[in-house]
Image (cartoon, rainbow, N blue to C red):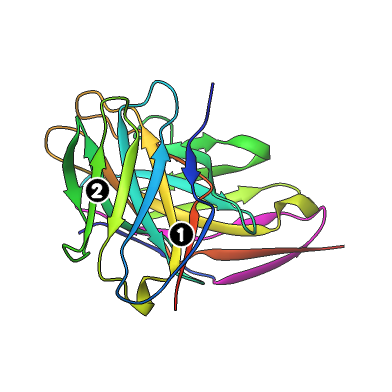
Amino acid sequence: ETGVTQSPTHLIKTRGQQVTLRCSSQSGHNTVSWYQQALGQGPQFIFQYYREEENGRGNFPPRFSGLQFPNYSSELNVNALELDDSALYLCASSFVRGDSQNEQYFGPGTRLTVT
Amino acid sequence: AQSVTQLDSHVSVSEGTPVLLRCNYSSSYSPSLFWYVQHPNKGLQLLLKYTSAATLVKGINGFEAEFKKSETSFHLTKPSAHMSDAAEYFCVVSTPFTGGGNKLTFGTGTQLKVEL
């Protein structure tokens, strides 16, 4: 069974640029969530994708957007990068059926540095 | 809104002694609660989860947590600490979405240090 994988592992971008982060969900999972973890803090929920649609969103501006593909992999796109976007971006996958609140399994993260 | 409060930002124990990491929750209904661990430069690993079944939940690596509704607590314990337990621990509450899915809300974390 393959776990959650993310790419790239590290990324350095300049303020104002755009970035795309990628995530492959764990085998058998149908839902992907993205979290932002700033240094020294707990992860903050960005959004979740279920059935290829945004299922829920945290307190992040529209320049944070995403996609989920038919194979349940996902992308996180961030436009107009700001210095405060520097963080560890974590992808998590889970299996959703009905109203179950299943645990989420996390990938190793992508470390984004904005200069 | 659901939330969790981790009462200690840092906990230091000696190897072989018990571990207690404290977490209180706030929820308007019976919550789903989790503990995750994050080792340095690694992703988050699920330790255990509570979803309204047994109030005492056993997890991996000898950890367990007890759900106490009267105290709105979900403290994490381990009888005997090991050096490999040194990490950041997060108490987490789940909020369901209508139609399926859920988001996780993390506490601020407790850094566990294990000394010889």
Q: Residue B79: where, in percent of width, then height?
A: 71, 47
Going 82% across and 57% down the picture, which residue do you hit?
A: B15
- Out of A23 and B43, give the one closest to the viewer: A23
Which numbered marker is on residue A14?
none
Q: What's the residue type where badge 1 is placed?
A: Cys
Q: Secondary structure at mark 1?
A: strand
Q: Which part of the image, by quadrant, shows the C terminus of chain B?
A: bottom right
Going 79% across and 54% down the picture, which residue do you hit?
A: B83
Chain under callout 1: B
Looking at the image, residue B92 lies above or below residue B55: below
Report the residue marked by disc 2. Answer: A66
Q: Residue A75: where, in percent of width, then height?
A: 32, 45
Q: Which part of the image, by quadrant, shows the N terminus of chain B?
A: bottom left
Whole-angstrom CA distance, mark 2 to mark 1, is 32 Å
Residue B19: say if magenta.
yes
Chain under callout 2: A
Establish whether labels 2 and 1 are both on one chain: no
Q: Residues within 10 Å of mark 1 (few under 14, many from 20)?
A: many
- Out of B73 and A107, give the one closest to the viewer: A107
Quadrant hosting residue A101? top left
Q: Residue A102: where, in percent of width, then height?
A: 35, 33
Mark in front: 2 vs 1: 2
Q: Main secondary structure of the magenta part?
A: strand
Q: What's the residue type where badge 2 is placed?
A: Gly
**Stretch of the chain drawn in magenta:** B9-28
Q: Is residue A55 visible?
A: yes
- B109 sits left or right of A78 in the view: right
Report the residue marked by disc 1. Answer: B23
